[in-house]
Image (spheres, helix red, strand yellow):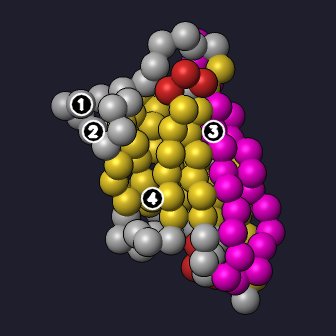
Amino acid sequence: QAQLVESGGGLVQAGGSLRLSCAATGSTSSFNAMGWYRQAPGKQREYVAAVTSVGSINYADAVKGRFTISRDNAKNTVYLQMDSLKPEDTAVYYCAADLHPQRGTWGIWGKGTQVTVSS
């Protein structure tokens, strides 16, 4: 069974950058889509960005122009380059994969990586 493992989180000052990675293990098939979500303390999980296997990309308005999602299909790995970070970007960032085209739900989730942006 496939699993997602996130890495790259940490503590950074406002205006800095971080690069998150999410690698899929235990699967030899390429997911139709992979994405990132985040959950700040006391808030609901929110969508950040997603990329399909053919390269279509979508961003949440809150991160557009600052975050860049990319994907290596051969490695079943998705990246999230985060620039110009703000304190409000502080959250646990989760990777998701295997989007159900009709339901709009994700079949697989990672355990998350903490991103903390200090002011």
Q: Which residues are magenta?
A: 1-23
Graded by Cα atoms within 10 Å as few (under 14), some (14 to 19) or many (20 or more), the crowding at tag 2 reads: few
For label 1, the residue is: 101
Q: Classify 46 as above or below 25.
A: below
Residue type at the position of mark 2: Gly
Q: Residue 29: give x, y in percent of width and height.
A: 48, 13
Q: Nearer the viewer, residue 113 or 66?
A: 66
Q: Residue 80: give x, y in percent of width and height.
A: 57, 53
Q: CA distance from mark 3 to mark 4?
A: 14 Å
Q: What residue is rendered at 73% in x and 45% in y?
A: 7
SS label for mark 4: strand
Which numbered marker is on residue 104?
2
Residue type at the position of mark 1: Pro
Q: CA distance from mark 3 to mark 1?
A: 21 Å
Res. 73 visible in picture: yes
Q: Residue 14: give x, y in percent of width and height.
A: 70, 83
Q: What residue is rendered at 42% in x and 54% in y?
A: 49
Q: Quadrant of the C terminus?
A: bottom right
Which numbered marker is on residue 54?
none
SS label for mark 2: loop
Which callout, 2 or 4, points at the residue further toward the start of the chain? Answer: 4
Q: Classify 81 as above or below 99.
A: below
* Residue 62 sits in quarter: bottom left
Graded by Cα atoms within 10 Å as few (under 14), some (14 to 19) or many (20 or more), the crowding at tag 3 reads: many
Q: CA distance from mark 2 to mark 4?
A: 15 Å
For label 4, the residue is: 48
